[in-house]
Amino acid sequence: MFVAPEGERIRAADRRATVDALVSEAAGGSQGDRAVSPSAAGAVSDDASTAYATVTCEVGAGDPADSGKDALEGAVDEARAAGLAVEAGGTALAGRPAAGGSAEAAGIALAAVVPLTTFGSSSARARRGPPNGGAPHAPCRCGLEPGAMSIRPWVIVEAPDRRGLRRVVVGGETVGSVWSLRELRRLLVGIGCPEDTDLEDPASVCWRGGGSGTWPDRAGRRRATIVLMAAGMLASMVLNAVVGWPDAHGALTFAQRLSGGLFVLSGLVEGAAAVAALDYWGKRQAKSSGAVVLVGVLVALTTDSLLLFLWADEREYTPYLLVFTPLWCWSVCALWLLVRERAWRGMPRPKTFAAGVVATALLTAVSLAYSTLYQPAAAPMHFMLKADFGTARTDSLRLLMHVPLKLHVKNSGGIPVYVVIDDYTVYGRSAEYSEGADRLEEWKRSLDEREPEDAERYVNRLTFRKISSGRLFRPGDWLEVGQEFSMERVVQIPTTTEFDRLDVVLQVTYMRKDRGKIDVTQFRRRHRSWDKAEGRYYCAPEKCGEEIYYHGRVRHNNNLVNVTRKPRYVTAIWSLREPPRYSISSFDFKGKVALSEERRDLERYGAATASVESEVSVAELLGSAEGGGD
């Protein structure tokens, strides 16, 4: 067996001449019969670094002559002196051949094996197939059978790479890589070698770059890296799925669904990267595993950076902060490690790949940030409200006047809405009348008292009293685009009433459904402020009066907002004394919230109030009621 020095070839002129001379000298002994050089027999590996030759000798029943042995040993020494690694074996060098027969063939095999090469001869192709698939290998012959002309496949254990992994080559073919001597023996047994194979025998195993005791693998550190990388990838996968899935399948707008879909897709990339990390910090059987891990880390860094950026806008505590902040630190460290190791090596065009990854990450970050910060206001809200008094009728027995009230609401905009709270209230106005009074002082007083800036020359001391109040919808009801609702009520007032005019105010407070989702079941529960059994909703009557509270969780339709902000709640308050009030903020009937936060959230969730007012004089009602009494 011949092995050329590292980086040289057997077919080089000087090396080929040395091999041919050795074969000729070995065949030129007194007992030499026939010898074929490696070049003529095709027994040279594809990379021309290894070769073997066979010399057939005819001997009698006795031992070969010493002259034949001496000639062979002298030829081997000369080849070794020329720089070749040479091993010789066979019955020609054995102490005594097996009995029987007048002639016996003895083979002298000269061969060498280098990583990832195979012999072109039919005997080499008949050996073990590829280690990762294909036809199974023939059993490995780790010893030379007496009387046979076959040679044993020489096992080569390559020098450790920078991670401590050593490649194993058998018969010119890579059969695997091992971290330790135990793994090497297990590998050899798996391909058919005996369990008691002597790994120190140079005729069986060739050790390169260190002997059987050279195993620089730091298993503990390597396994810890695998655990940390895989755990970080899996945690990022779960976080991205939690952030993206609600938007991907439940958002109303395309931009929000796209944002959610990108996060779900990034979660799938993280899952693939977690699997690739096992191979990259393992035996690297897949060339692209490092690139996949690098993509996963860049995706994690991009999404975690976006979450941190959104959180920094308002800097509110959220439990998710304890997740994406450590993950951001992890992704920075992981990226540093991968860049140091140049994980993109093995890709056909690493620079193009790196540029594509960076560009994709930046575009994804910009897209997510835009879809998060952009509020869909292209479709403005329009409500059509009507409140009219009808023709009155009198009840002569009870001296009452029945006044019909017609209410109508229609969502004439392009976005469905939730009804947060609504109310209609009928007021009776009374006033004192005077001749030519100067209304300037009263008008000034109305400005100081923040009352309506109305002034009439002959009207003084206006007084408004609530006659009737009610609601059209339940809190949490919604109106689809184009949906309308009508209601008729009857207001009763005495025919001898002190009021000179009836006013009605209809108002509807709504929240856009493309901005958020209300927990309707929770929001519809009524809480009475005067009932101590209501717990945190209780408020002393002397402080709050008698009010009804509606309170429930609201979630933004872009889940990025939900995970980077404190929980938000929608609150509505209805009472007989005051107009309805509402709020969207972090207020949960505990503590206080800043007015600026409340205003910001009302705008963020698209909450607003639409209202309409109508009035009719009592004289007109009495006139229309003439002749209509019972």
Image: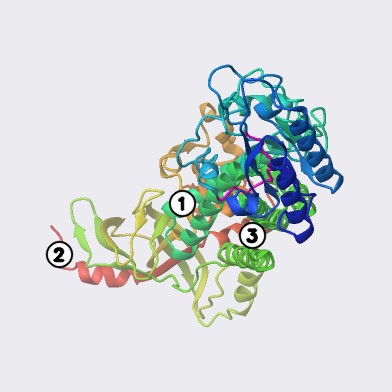
Query: Secondary structure under badge 2?
Result: loop
Amino acid type of the residue that numbered disc 1 sits on in the rendered structure: Lys
| 129 lies left or right of 601 | left
Q: Is residue 115 magenta?
A: yes
Q: Quadrant of residue 391?
A: bottom left
Q: Quadrant of the N terminus?
A: top right
Amino acid type, mark 3:
Met
The kind of secondary structure element at disc 3 is loop
Judged by its main secondary structure, the magenta piece is loop
**As rendered, which of 309 and 335 lies closer to the eye?**
335
The residue singled out by tag 1 in the image is: 517
Name the N-terminal-most of marks 2 and 1: 1
**Closer to the camera in the image, 462 or 334:** 334
Residue 103 part of the magenta segment: no
Q: Is residue 522 above or below residue 446?
A: above
Question: Does residue 477 appear left or right of residue 158 in this picture?
Answer: left
* CA–CA distance in space, label 3 to label 2: 93 Å
Type of amino acid at the residue the image marks with label 2: Gly
Label 1 sits on a secondary structure element that is strand
C-alpha distance separating marks 3 and 1: 46 Å
Q: Identify residue for label 2.
A: 628
Find residue 164 and report its horizontal and vertical position in percent: 77, 38
Q: Between marks 2 and 1, how big is the CA–CA gap?
A: 50 Å
Residue 14 vertical position relative to residue 69 in the rendered view, above or below: below
Which residues lie in the magenta part?
107-120
**Label 2–label 1 contact, CB within 8 A:** no
Q: Is residue 250 left or right of residue 26?
A: left
> Which is nearer the N-term, disc 3 or disc 2?
3
